[in-house]
């Protein structure tokens, strides 16, 4: 009897697996209002307005006064970055920030690309929109939406944009030239934060879809990592007919059979379709597990009580810098925690790192950016169980927080047409390795358009 029940259960699971795995579901395309108060009866202003990043003597003076009053705790001997941001190295950051960093110059750099704002669902949405400077006669650019994550910003894409919009100038074929749109997630940087609870990645995806339609794009490519990967995935789940192709450098694979094989994968990898490279990146399992524990404490705080820590970070520029820049150390390479300087200047300049920090400081958006975790890390996220039936490309960077094997990606993205093991790089792919990411995006688009 028990054998019959077991066989029936296994058979039922197999039937369910094969019947459900190709079922094409979409998320409902609803509507929302995230501005203050009730939604006005008058129609929303859909105009697109030019925007310019600005600063002032008062803003810079206030920053310097707060930096001058910093109080630091000496680090433990030989602690390097194992306890978080080493305050001895932080002194160098502070000195550079106070005495050498030129925020006015960085504002000029930020304004090199055209900035705009437009109201969508009650929020002022900020974005940059960069068109190719020149194209061969008869060729039209491919629209590409690129979405950042936390603690990043639209600035992450400044070095990859020229490779995508003006490839010939950078030694690449002009067969694939893109028109790039990089919005700021609401509550990040220059995009207005929601006044209401519940603003999550699905709402963001819907707003960014409306943004692309407002710009005149009926079909477009999307690319993202971190929260950007989830937002772009949600766009493909909401409006698959509008998303021509989806390229990711991170994937959220949670409700999936293959994730259950992680404990056995390192020993029986081939049985589950893992490659030798997969097994290298997923072992030793103990090390991977402890690395995740070390690197996800912030997530627990931000997904439960974001406003509490936000009070401190929004009041102290040095505290904010330590909190943000620590991620650019160990998320770039976990081995950087063994270095006195966290390896920060091995991949980034201090100007770039402090510019990213200033986008949170000057806009006062660290708290609203952290709320995105509380709104998204819920048990009732229906999108987690919906597969994505849009052509997909994936770039697996070796120092990403969690390696996602091709088997895992394909289980959620059945139309995976490109999966690349990247030779180097970590979480902030566009910021760290713009050339590698640009090449992989171009490879994916080429494969898709030749189909």
Image (tube, helix red, strand yellow):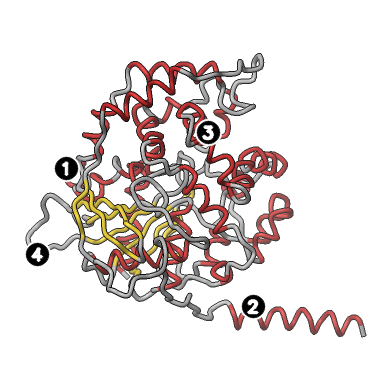
Q: Position of residue 400 (x, y in %)?
A: 53, 44
| Residue under the point 49% across and 67% down | 413
| Residue at mark 2 | 17
Question: Of callouts 1 and 3, which one flags the residue occurring earlier in the amino acid sequence?
Answer: 1
Q: What is the secondary structure assignment of the residue under circle 1?
A: helix
In the displayed structure, would residue 55 be above or below residue 398? Answer: above
Looking at the picture, tell me which residue is in the foreground, 38 or 17: 38
Q: Is residue 225 left or right of residue 76?
A: left
| Residue at mark 3 | 323
In the displayed structure, would residue 369 be above or below residue 378? Answer: above
Q: Is residue 37 left or right of residue 287?
A: left
| Residue at mark 4 | 138
Q: Position of residue 12 (x, y in %)?
A: 73, 83
Question: Of callouts 2 and 3, which one flags the residue occurring earlier in the amino acid sequence?
Answer: 2
Specify the quadrant that holds the N terminus: bottom right
Specify the quadrant that holds the C terminus: bottom left
Circles 4 and 2: CB distance less than 8 Å? no
Question: Of callouts 2 and 1, which one flags the residue occurring earlier in the amino acid sequence?
Answer: 2
Looking at the picture, tell me which residue is in the foreground, 432 or 46: 46
Question: Of callouts 4 and 2, which one flags the residue occurring earlier in the amino acid sequence?
Answer: 2
Looking at the picture, tell me which residue is in the foreground, 308 or 202: 308
Measure how far apart labels 2 and 3 are at the Cα level: 43 Å
| Residue under the point 57% across and 39% down | 309
Question: Of callouts 4 and 1, which one flags the residue occurring earlier in the amino acid sequence?
Answer: 4
Measure how far apart labels 1 and 3 are at the Cα level: 37 Å
């Amino acid at each position: 009897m028990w054998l019959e029940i077991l066989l029936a259960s296994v058979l039922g699971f197999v039937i369910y697996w094969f019947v459900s795995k190709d079922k094409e579901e979409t998320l409902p395309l609803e509507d929302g209002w995230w501005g203050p108060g009730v939604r006005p009866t008058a129609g929303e202003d859909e105009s697109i307005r030019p925007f310019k990043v600005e600063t002032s003597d008062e803003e810079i003076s206030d920053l310097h006064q707060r930096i001058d009053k910093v109080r630091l705790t000496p680090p433990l001997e030989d602690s390097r970055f194992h306890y978080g941001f080493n305050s001895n190295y932080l002194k160098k950051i502070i000195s550079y920030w106070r005495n050498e960093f030129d925020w006015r110059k960085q504002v000029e750099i930020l304004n090199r690309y055209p900035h705009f704002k437009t109201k969508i669902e009650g929020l002022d949405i900020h974005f940059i929109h960069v068109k190719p400077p020149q194209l061969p006669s008869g060729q039209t650019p491919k629209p590409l939406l690129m979405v950042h994550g936390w603690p990043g910003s639209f600035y992450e894409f400044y070095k990859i944009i020229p490779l995508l919009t003006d490839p010939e100038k950078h030694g690449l074929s002009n067969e694939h030239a893109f028109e790039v749109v990089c919005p700021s997630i609401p509550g990040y940087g220059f995009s207005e934060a929601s006044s209401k609870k519940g603003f999550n990645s699905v709402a963001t995806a819907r707003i960014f879809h409306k943004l692309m339609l407002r710009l005149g794009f009926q079909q477009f490519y999307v690319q993202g990592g971190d929260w950007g990967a989830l937002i772009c995935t949600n766009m493909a789940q909401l409006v698959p007919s509008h998303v021509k192709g989806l390229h990711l450098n991170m994937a959220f694979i949670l409700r999936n059979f293959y994730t259950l094989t992680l404990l056995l994968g390192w020993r029986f990898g081939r049985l589950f379709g893992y490659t030798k490279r997969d097994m290298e990146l997923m072992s030793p399992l103990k090390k991977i597990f402890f690395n995740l524990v070390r690197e996800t404490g912030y997530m627990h705080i931000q997904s439960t009580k974001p406003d509490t820590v936000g009070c401190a970070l929004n009041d102290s520029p040095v505290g904010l810098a330590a909190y943000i820049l620590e991620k650019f150390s160990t998320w770039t390479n976990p081995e950087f925690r063994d270095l006195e300087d966290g390896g920060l200047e091995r991949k980034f300049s201090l100007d770039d790192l402090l510019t990213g920090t200033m986008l949170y400081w000057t806009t006062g958006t660290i708290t609203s950016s952290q709320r995105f975790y509380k709104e998204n890390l819920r048990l009732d996220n229906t999108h987690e169980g919906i597969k994505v039936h849009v052509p997909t490309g994936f770039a697996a960077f070796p120092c990403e927080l969690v390696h996602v094997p091709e088997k895992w990606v394909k289980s959620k993205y059945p139309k995976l047409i490109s999966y690349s093991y990247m030779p180097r790089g970590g979480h902030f792919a566009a910021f760290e390795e713009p050339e590698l990411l640009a090449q992989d995006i171009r490879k994916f688009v080429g494969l898709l358009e030749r189909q």
